[in-house]
């Protein structure tokens, strides 16, 4: 069964380009920045904040890379 992808287009990943709805950001750093834009605000970035932002991936290795990218954006990360 083929399921159509509702994504409109791919981004060219220009640094100055604002992401439009439906555009897929390329690169892990850009994706994490978009998904967790308010991560440095402790009043917003609580358990519910993270529960509502889930990134699905195919392997645990990619999960680890995503977790590292998110952790680097947290205040107090070494």
Image (cartoon, rainbow, N blue to C red):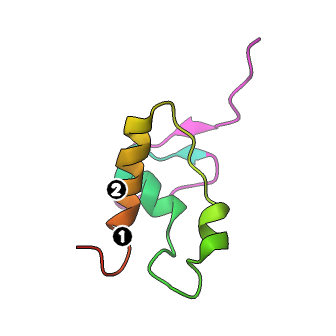
- The relative height of residue 57 versus residue 77 in the rendered view (above or below) is above
Image side of residue 22 versus residue 24, left or right: right
User: In which quarter of the view is residue 20 placed?
Assistant: bottom right
Q: Nearer the viewer, residue 30 or 74?
A: 74
Q: Residue at x 74, y 21 (%)?
A: 3
Q: Residue at x 50, y 60 (%)?
A: 34
Q: Residue at x 40, y 61 (%)?
A: 70
> Disc 1 marks which residue?
73
Q: Residue at x 52, y 56 (%)?
A: 19
Furthest toward the bottom, the residue is 43
Image quarter (top left, top right, bottom left or bottom right) of the N terminus? top right
Is 28 included in the stretch rendered in magenta? no
Chief secondary structure of the magenta span?
A: loop
Of the two numbered discs 2 and 1 in the rendering, the one whose residue sits closer to the viewer: 2
Give SS at disc 2.
helix
> Disc 2 marks which residue?
68
Q: Are marks 2 and 1 in contact (CB under 8 Å)?
A: no
């Amino acid at each position: 069964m083929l399921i159509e992808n509702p994504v409109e287009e791919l981004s060219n990943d220009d640094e100055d380009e604002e992401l439009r709805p439906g555009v897929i950001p390329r690169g892990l750093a850009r994706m994490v920045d978009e998904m967790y834009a308010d991560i440095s605000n402790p009043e917003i970035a609580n358990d519910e904040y993270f529960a509502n932002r889930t990134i699905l991936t195919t392997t645990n290795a990619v999960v680890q890379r995503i977790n590292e990218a998110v952790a680097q954006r947290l205040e107090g990360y070494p």
